[in-house]
């Protein structure tokens, strides 16, 4: 990765210092600041140039890609490369070694990953930018199950877990459960293992992939298949697979995976989504401006309407902007 500083100013004031002067004005005021800044008299930020590399979560990938498209429309001389590597794969292989500016994650960074980063002179900065409803899905031909509890899910997905559907309920088919899910490098895998499967650990005899298309195709191929992925990908393929309702406890009501339920906290597999720009990368203007743009737009309605995630709250966006200014503004 070419590490080029691209320092720019507005009448002698760096854009990071300019951000500090309007920090109390919220995201709307900050957005106006972004659109009015220029370099050498150019309009719409055309003077900004350089490269930003984003790796990480396949769940967050559609958001980052949409942000990239909108950002580069305003700043065509900035190249933003967005790669879907899995949360853990991004931390381990790209971000912590210093080869990416931002890592997206569908779960918080782990202590070992933070240590790996620190050892390489990379300082992660955590920002929650959206929420998701992790979705468990089956074939549209599956007519025997509509809802599963965490206990039933754990019995299916744990090491040495259920081999047939009848192992979960004797009235269900005595046929092998064919399992598809994210790879072990995925934050979705990590979140599901920690929050649903538990100490027994996630079984390894399943088809693991970072390509959600493979999971959908697996569910279409067999009435006995099951798989899980982020809600955004389910929403794109709702006519091809059947989403299951979920309940955390056997006595709870079954909750359907929807953005409304995730936002309200009534869907038990709702989870936060993050980006982790590095403190060092934020000193470069292209990275700083892209993260600033990301935060400003994280509350936008199009997050839900176009990429099917719960947008960040205004409070969360303000906290993220304060963090950005604290890290890169001085």
Image (cartoon, grey):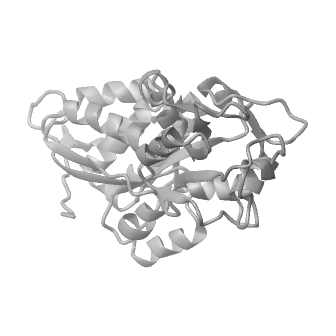
Residue at image location 52% in from the left, 69% down from the top: 113
Residue at image location 38% in from the left, 52% down from the top: 328
In this rendering, position of residue 254 left or right of residue 87: right
The image quadrant of residue 16 is: top left
Please, which residue is most extreme toward the front here?
Answer: 174
**Which residue is more in the foreground, 79 or 188?**
188
In this rendering, the answer to whether 109 lies above or below 133 is: below
The percent position of residue 239, horizontal first and vertical second, equals 49, 25
The image quadrant of residue 74 is: top left
**Which residue is more in the foreground, 220 or 325?**
220
The percent position of residue 264, horizontal first and vertical second, equals 70, 27
Please, which residue is most extreme toward the right here?
Answer: 251
The percent position of residue 106, horizontal first and vertical second, equals 54, 49
Q: Is residue 26 visible?
A: no
In this rendering, position of residue 236 left or right of residue 39: right
**Which residue is more in the foreground, 194 or 217?**
217
The image quadrant of residue 78 is: top left
The percent position of residue 73, horizontal first and vertical second, equals 20, 30
In this rendering, the answer to whether 236 lies above or below 103 is: above
Residue at image location 45% in from the left, 71% down from the top: 117
């Amino acid at each position: 990765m070419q590490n080029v500083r691209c320092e720019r100013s507005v009448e002698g004031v760096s854009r990071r210092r300019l951000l500090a002067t309007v920090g109390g004005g919220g995201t709307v005021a900050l957005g106006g600041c972004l659109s009015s800044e220029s370099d050498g008299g150019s309009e719409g930020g055309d003077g900004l140039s350089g490269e930003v590399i984003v790796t990480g979560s396949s769940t967050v990938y559609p958001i980052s890609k949409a942000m990239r498209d909108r950002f580069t429309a305003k700043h065509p001389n900035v190249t933003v490369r967005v790669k879907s590597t899995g949360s853990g794969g991004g931390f381990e292989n790209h971000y912590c070694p210093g080869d990416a500016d931002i890592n997206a994650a569908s779960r918080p960074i782990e202590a070992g990953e933070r240590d790996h980063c620190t050892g390489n002179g990379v300082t992660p900065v955590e920002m929650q930018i959206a929420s998701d409803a992790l979705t468990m899905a089956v074939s549209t031909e599956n007519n025997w199950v509509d809802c599963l509890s965490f206990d039933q899910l754990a019995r299916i997905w744990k090491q040495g877990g259920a081999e047939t559907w009848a192992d979960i309920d004797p009235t269900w088919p005595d046929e092998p459960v064919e399992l598809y899910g994210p790879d072990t490098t995925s934050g979705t895998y990590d979140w599901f293992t920690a929050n649903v499967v538990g100490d027994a650990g996630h079984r390894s005899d399943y088809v693991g992939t970072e390509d959600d298309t493979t999971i959908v195709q697996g569910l279409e191929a067999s009435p006995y298949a099951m798989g899980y992925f982020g809600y955004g990908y389910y929403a794109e393929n709702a006519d091809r697979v059947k989403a299951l309702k979920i309940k955390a406890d056997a006595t709870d009501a079954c909750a359907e995976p929807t953005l409304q339920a995730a936002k309200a906290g009534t869907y038990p597999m709702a989870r936060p989504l993050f980006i982790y720009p590095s403190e060092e990368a934020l000193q470069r203007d292209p990275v700083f401006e892209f993260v600033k743009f990301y935060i400003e737009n994280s509350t936008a309605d199009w997050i839900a309407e176009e990429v099917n995630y719960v947008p960040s709250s205004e409070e969360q966006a303000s906290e993220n902007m304060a963090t950005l200014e604290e890290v890169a503004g001085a």
